[in-house]
Amino acid sequence: MGEPKQLLPFGESTIVETVVDRMLGAKFDEVIVVVGHCAGQIQEQLSERPVKIVFNPDYHDGMLTSAQAGIRALNISDAFALMLVDQPFITSALIDQVIDAYVQTDSGIALPSYNYKRGHPVIFQRQYGDDVLALGVESGGVRTLFKRYADDIHYVTVDTDRVLRDIDYREDYERALKEN
């Protein structure tokens, strides 16, 4: 991208603000935002929002280290969700759909599925936090848990690709601005 994508304008705010606002509008008890690169700028953008900011000093080692930093900061004992900052298309209603499905299932992991592709957010029973914390940087990340615990996943079928779409390249961002 050439610049921090989370700080790019999106609608009336930035990408990170859009994602955080949608999380705050969902049924989460607490929202933890893990920051690394450009931490000060992102924290400033979110200063008016009721979120807990956690700095990940190992952000340069990849997304797994951010997931681990967030899990270490959890104050709950039931469940947690993982979301990505570059998916501003996921609405509060979609998040709540996954949360509601998680609550109604006996499975320890719930995630949205569109056309048989896994999306976000992913909801985990708290016990899986220890599994995430035990993963090494070369492990392949949180996705490895989907293979290991395939029998404990509840797929929530959704009717939109919003749970899959992210902004990785300039073209993705430009297309997203037109659709927003």
Image (spheres, rainbow, N blue to C red):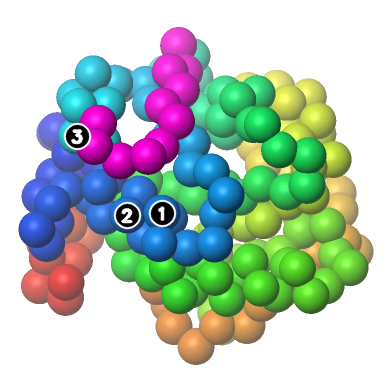
State whether residue 152 is above or below residue 105: above
Residue 176 drawn at (x, y percent): 18, 66
Residue 106 seen by the camera: yes
Magenta stretch encompasses residue 53: yes
Residue closest to the far top: 57
Query: What residue lies at 65% left-to-right and 23% top-to-bottom?
Result: 72
Q: CA distance from mark 2 to mark 1?
A: 5 Å
Name the residue type under label 2: Asp
Magenta stretch encompasses residue 156: no
- Are the residues at dot 2 and dot 1 in contact (C-beta closer than 8 Å)? yes
Name the residue type under label 1: Leu
Residue 64 seen by the camera: no
Report whether 19 appears left or right of 81.
left
Report whether 21 appears left or right of 141.
left
Q: Quick one: quadrant of the N terminus?
A: top left
For disc 3, the marked residue is: 45
Report whether 22 appears left or right of 57.
left
Between discs 3 and 2, the one toward the N terminus = 2
Q: Secondary structure at mark 1?
A: helix
Q: Which mark is residue 24?
A: 1
Magenta range is 47-57
Residue 79 drawn at (x, y percent): 73, 48
Occupied quadrant, residue 41: top left
Main SS of the magenta part reads: loop
Between discs 3 and 1, the one toward the N terminus = 1
Residue closest to the far bottom: 159
Occupied quadrant, residue 158: bottom right
Query: What residue lies at 85% left-to-right and 65% top-to-bottom?
Result: 107
For disc 2, the marked residue is: 21
Name the residue type under label 3: Gln
